[in-house]
Image (cartoon, helix red, strand yellow):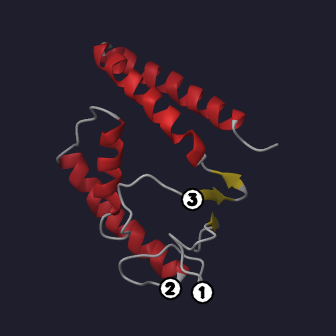
Amino acid sequence: MSNSYKYIDPDFTYTDPKTALLRNLQDITDPDVLLFVESSAVTKRLQELYENPIKVESSDSIFEIHRHLFQDIYFWAGKKRTVEISKDCKQFFPTSHFDNAFRYIDQLIPEFKKLPKNNKRQFAESVRKEFAKQCVNCQPH
């Protein structure tokens, strides 16, 4: 059941040096248990968001959503990541590009709000493709 996350965290800011797992509020050291507890907690919090959505006004709203989803598991929930993370040898969006990405998101949100509801899915898909392109362009080759 374990996932294959590998964390690049030389100062062990987010990871436990003994287990290489993310430090968590419950001090869980077994990867399968952490995955189960995280999944359960996030599922509960996701239902809360479904019932009581957080309105997205800016990129700060994304941090608010992240904090809500992971508040029961991680001390850093809702904070900007400071280490690089990869899964299956594929790096997540690099921290060095966060500031530009958040500025871009902040520019897109007002445009998104102006669109008629029937065009929002198409707009979201074009934004997803743009971010995917940006991610590919910043990957080490």
Query: Distance between the Cα atoms at labels 3 and 2?
Result: 20 Å
The answer to whether 96 is drawn above or below residue 113 in the figure is: below
Q: Element under label 2?
A: loop
Percent across and percent down for residue 107 are 40, 22
Query: Distance between the Cα atoms at labels 1 and 2?
Result: 9 Å
| The disc label shown at residue 29, or none | 2
Q: Element under label 3?
A: loop
In this view of the protein, which residue sits in the foreground, 17 or 72? Answer: 17
Mark 1 or mark 2, earlier in chain: 1
Q: Is residue 76 left or right of residue 3?
A: left
Q: Which residue is mark 3?
A: 83
Q: Is residue 119 left or right of residue 20?
A: left
Q: Circles 1 and 2: CB distance less than 8 Å?
A: yes
Task: Tell me which residue sits at (65%, 57%) in the image.
Answer: 86
Q: Which residue is mark 1?
A: 18
Mark 1 vs mark 2: give the one in front. Answer: 1
In this view, which residue lies farthest toward the right? 141
Task: Tell me which residue sits at (38%, 28%) in the image.
Answer: 106
Mark 3 or mark 2, earlier in chain: 2
Name which residue type carries label 2: Thr
Would you identify the image quadrant in which residue 88 lies?
A: bottom right
Name which residue type carries label 3: Val
Residue 50, visible in the rendered structure: yes
Percent across and percent down for residue 119 are 38, 15
Mark 3 vs mark 2: give the one in front. Answer: 3
In this view of the protein, which residue sits in the foreground, 114 or 23? Answer: 23
Task: Tell me which residue sits at (61%, 67%) in the image.
Answer: 9
Q: Residues within 10 Å of mark 2 (few under 14, many from 20)?
A: some
Q: Is residue 45 left or right of residue 87?
A: left
Task: Tell me which residue sits at (36%, 16%) in the image.
Answer: 111
The answer to whether 121 is drawn above or below residue 67 in the figure is: above
